[in-house]
Image (spheres, rainbow, N blue to C red):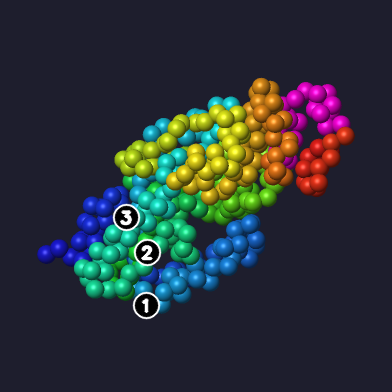
Amino acid sequence: MTTTRERIREQALTLGFDAVGFARAEAAGEVRDNLAAFVGQGLHGDMGWMADTAERRADPRTLWPEARSAVVVAVNYGPDSDPLARLGQRERGLVSVYAQGRDYHDVMKKRLRVLARWMHETFKHEVKLFVDTAPVMEKPLAQAAGLGWQGKHTNLVSRGFGSWLFLGEVLTTLPLEPDAAESDHCGECRRCLDACPTQAFTAPYRIDARRCISYLTIEHKGHIAAEFRAAIGNRIYGCDDCLAVCPWNKFATPTPHDEFAARAGTPLLAELAALDDAAFRLRFAGSPVKRIGRDRFVRNVLIAMGNSGDARLAETARSLLADPSPLVRAMAVWALRRLLPPAAFATLAAGRRDPDPDVAAEWAA
């Protein structure tokens, strides 16, 4: 006789999820303590939503006291080539693997709605679905459900899919037998920790988001500190270094889902720097990249231009010195300082004034 768990698993796989696990709708005390310490030390940086929702985020039962079980699902978004190979293409911008296709929030949520509705209609129990944006600790739940473990880089690692899984959850009042939690298989390996360009890991399983390139290029709204700019290289949205070097990726396979296939390779920096707001929105419609907005995106592009060593990009940077955004103007100055000969930059900087103190500081640096 087919069990309730087997029926749910079969339905989830039919809907296009690649892995399914079951856990109790609760969080271990260690998870709550780690989150409190992370936020208490300010390691979350600008991500105020993390502090604002910490109490609810720490335990699904705080979010929904009636919840009994969590159905945790995952989708494989594995790349079809080594994402680090493109770091050498300095005239082009590198977008994190997860953001090269359609926004996974939209894709996952659509499938989760169908699964949740089917569960509600079939088993007559209440359901609520979550995909990243809601205050649920997804990775600990995924580990409790046996889908993988939180590696030393703090991301989920799967024995079957490596580092490349999107997660989603359906919480339900339906009592379900939990799967056995996955154990940690990192061993003595520290490749992810050593690969970080900005030394964002303070210890195994501990990250200072304020130093992380993914945080700096996506979450951070202000000027990126000078100490991190050179290490960013040509990464214009996110960073895959700690994920890509994981030895467990030898078991990973390219995503079978067309929605997560790379849209247009690695775009030229000069082309991206020329985008105005309307062109940016059009180009990245349906992409996670769109959510950071044109100004922060072009800020990132200009940092990559400054790191390119290609003097031909100086004219593109010069054209942005009068941009309305101080984020863009400041990084245009920084890029020009690195692209022009010192004498040429000094001539350009002579007599320059800017109402934004951070831009003025870049001219005076």
Q: Residue furthest left?
A: 1
| Residue 334, magenta (yes or no) | yes
x and y percentages locating residue 276 in the rendered image: 60, 39
Q: Main secondary structure of the magenta part?
A: helix
Query: Which quarter shows the C terminus?
Result: top right
> How far apart in space, not on screen, are marks 2 and 3 (Cα)?
10 Å
Name the residue that disc number 2 marks.
Answer: 129
Q: Which residue is mark 3?
A: 111
Q: Say which of marks 2 and 1 sits in front.
A: 2
Identified by mark 2, the residue type is Leu
Left or right side of 100 for 207: right
First in sequence: mark 3 or mark 1?
A: 1
Magenta range: 329-350
Q: Quadrant of the N terminus?
A: bottom left
- Residue at numbered disc 1: 66
User: Disc 3 to disc 1, how far (Cα)?
Assistant: 23 Å
Q: Position of residue 221 (x, y in %)?
A: 64, 51
